[in-house]
Image: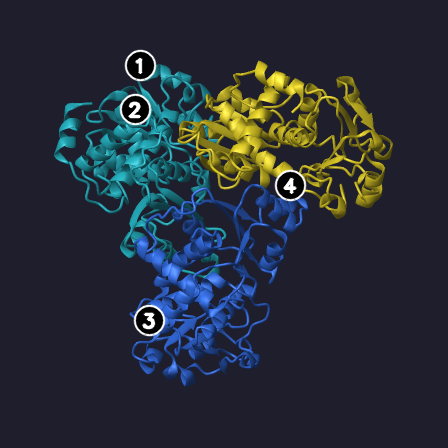
Chain colours: A blue, B yellow, C cyan
Amino acid sequence: MSTEVGEASTMSAAWTRRHLLGLEDLSAEELILILDTAASFKEATGGCKKKLPSLTGRTCANLFFEPSTRTRTSFSLAARRLGADTVDFSSSGSSLSKGETFIDTAKNIEAMGVDVVVVRHRTPGTPHLLAQNLACSVINAGDGPHEHPTQGLLDIMTVREQLGRIDGLTVALVGDIAHSRTARSNIWGLKKLGAHVIVCGPSTLVSPLWREVGVEVSHNLDAILPRCDVLNLLRIQFERQTTRPFPSVREYAHLYAMNRERLAKAKEDILILAPGPINRGVELTPEVADGPHSVILEQVTNGLAVRMAVLWLICGAL
Amino acid sequence: MSTEVGEASTMSAAWTRRHLLGLEDLSAEELILILDTAASFKEATGGCKKKLPSLTGRTCANLFFEPSTRTRTSFSLAARRLGADTVDFSSSGSSLSKGETFIDTAKNIEAMGVDVVVVRHRTPGTPHLLAQNLACSVINAGDGPHEHPTQGLLDIMTVREQLGRIDGLTVALVGDIAHSRTARSNIWGLKKLGAHVIVCGPSTLVSPLWREVGVEVSHNLDAILPRCDVLNLLRIQFERQTTRPFPSVREYAHLYAMNRERLAKAKEDILILAPGPINRGVELTPEVADGPHSVILEQVTNGLAVRMAVLWLICGAL
Amino acid sequence: MSTEVGEASTMSAAWTRRHLLGLEDLSAEELILILDTAASFKEATGGCKKKLPSLTGRTCANLFFEPSTRTRTSFSLAARRLGADTVDFSSSGSSLSKGETFIDTAKNIEAMGVDVVVVRHRTPGTPHLLAQNLACSVINAGDGPHEHPTQGLLDIMTVREQLGRIDGLTVALVGDIAHSRTARSNIWGLKKLGAHVIVCGPSTLVSPLWREVGVEVSHNLDAILPRCDVLNLLRIQFERQTTRPFPSVREYAHLYAMNRERLAKAKEDILILAPGPINRGVELTPEVADGPHSVILEQVTNGLAVRMAVLWLICGAL
């Protein structure tokens, strides 16, 4: 662990927020408190396998209005490894189909004694709306293309765990920046912890406006590759795109996929992240996905650690 | 708590039923035993938030053949707060799609060591059919337009908690009486505990035959409003109606919606209940739903208390 | 318990497999170790009703890509009665709809700290593919028409429990052998434990090639019936058939359904099994399904016992 991280951790002993809505609002100290807590949980539970029942009697509700395997399950398992109860809601089969408003549904869930609502919704700002209307805690598990803070945290945790620091690293987020909440959460978190962030992809998916918040913008992966300590290969979100942002998947892969040839031109110890589900052959080739630089599955395990940390901090179980 | 309730509670120390199929069959003493038990659970668990693991090792199965968010979740959480395990079945993805009969499905669930089956089905009498065929306990969570006993109990618990008694109160059930199992369960429960019950709504939705069981029938909310201690605004069940029972929603709301103007003509301490999901602007306006007379969310919390009480009494965990 | 079983049990004290993929690979000793363990669990838990929390802190994931009520629930309840946590995945709403490969989905689940993956898939060999790619344990809960080992085990457990032995019994598997994974698992298990196995059904559903592995093949139930100690009436899997293997259900039932008339021609203590969901009036008449020879519901309870045993052995909780 680098010096700046240890110091920051000492400075920020207390967590005071009731919600986790995004990384844009968090201070570097708050980010490091979550990351340190997550690392402790991971160690104490043998890689997030054992239980640590510090939230016994608490109830977490998953309120997911978009399909999700890993995030919903990761939150459920994180809650249960802390001894909390979980309940799942989904858009189908719910009261929403009977004409109830979204906030009324959430208030009803809260009235059943739920402590934390984990919400995913295609509309940006939905978690913020809930946070204004509920007395319980709200965690954003993805609001449209806006933020996905626990994904950003698990990516950052994985980089910090592997490379020992964030400060001074060059991290490129490659691909579908326009539709990616993961990109946004990474950008805010990485910059606050001192990384140099590059967004890279076709001009239809990477806006030049990112320069205004201090992010480097590139449309040429081969040009920036030699400088990168970390590549985070974002999923092409075919399901969110209403127009085709590039001529073909083959064309995209030719320009932006991480493959053996590109790996040969990168730094020797480059770290390859990909917030799954991955499209093999699109964002990266199987030999890269399954190769020594890839930490894709470590990201999944760290997702559990980060979610345990966030639930624990938010529930005030200090 | 009124005197008659305290006495009744003392009189009926024991619960002897294996099933809860409806409120029509219960005695006043049995109703009060459930209500008193629910109130105790609510107090002992800090408003149904904490666990009280008196049913550890028991298993409750939800067998829901109609969409439901709140009732299914409420039963699951009630069971788990008592330490019981829960399993969910639904009509999709089940053996019924492979040609199995309903009773065979239920018998299979029972053979897996389930103690209580909570069933919702669009056909009246389904829970009774199960009760005749299963050795385990059956709780009716809504059988078509027939009964929904735990909803009736939670409504009555909420009135009793707020006003201290049921005996002598005037309670109006407003709206879609014809399609409402909640109305039926409320009618039987309220009358047994001594309330004067009025059913009020358009003549297409409120049958004059209710008079034969001692219920007042009205088609004019404004005429009965000044006499009411409690209004229970039933949801217009658009999904159950095959013909249009009134010209338009606007017309219905004009005649029967609870709004600021009507509130001004009601008793000063009138209690407004609504068994959600509510249609804002149909049965009641947002200012009434969110106003000081509304106990809508208290109903949800009491739903947990009532279900904990029923599960506990039925499992014989005395 | 017969002598040969007791001896075998003593001989094979240790379980060494990480996966349960099929009964074809198991030795008689391994089969008997599972059956003995299952019988012990059933007795120790009062018929699989009580908890025996020997797998606390373990997590089992259900990865079901075909509809299932009983098997999925049976595995979940078995895991939870041993104190393990469970998570459910299904094909809908999962990352597979976002383009992820099956193995990547499974590896992600494993990276969340899952100890055992229970998989059902319509493609034969899927569990074997997972076992080659995952470090955690894999249990086959049905791979197309190939194997369904815990179903085979629960059928065999039920016969052994009722008749005290397997060795020397004549067991007929009747019906849809071609599409039945249950048939295959029964055949391998029964033969290894010394039973004489007959497969019986229309020639479109029963291949003469079974003779090559020492199984008797018959197309005439009435001819073999007097010799049978056990009938296992396989479900006609209408959903797996692409062509009609017989002229009509009526024709099938006429030739192969177990009914009162056939029962009169069978051994006095013949045992009737049917791995549900059953089609009443197709494979067997209601009077047989609900009669004294039927052990259909005992099979369901034994399914729990067998799954508890398999989970416990595989998790090495000796």
- Distance, label 3 to label 4, CA atoms, is 49 Å
- Asked whether the residues under the numbered discs 3 and 4 touch, taking CB atoms below 8 Å apart as contact, a structural biologist would say no
- Label 3: state its secondary structure: loop
Q: Looking at the picture, do discs 4 and 2 lie on one chain?
A: no
- Label 4: state its secondary structure: helix
* Amino acid type, callout 3: Gly
Q: Whole-percent x and y of residue B156? A: 66, 28
- Label 1: state its secondary structure: loop
User: Residue beneath label 1, please?
Assistant: C268
Q: Residue at x 29, y 56 (%)?
A: C133
Quadrant assignment, res C189: top left
* Amino acid type, callout 2: Val
User: Residue beneath label 3, please?
Assistant: A164
**Which of the labelled discs sits on residue B297, or is there none?**
4
Quadrant assignment, res A40: bottom left
Q: Is residue B112 left or right of residue B42?
A: left
* Amino acid type, callout 4: Leu
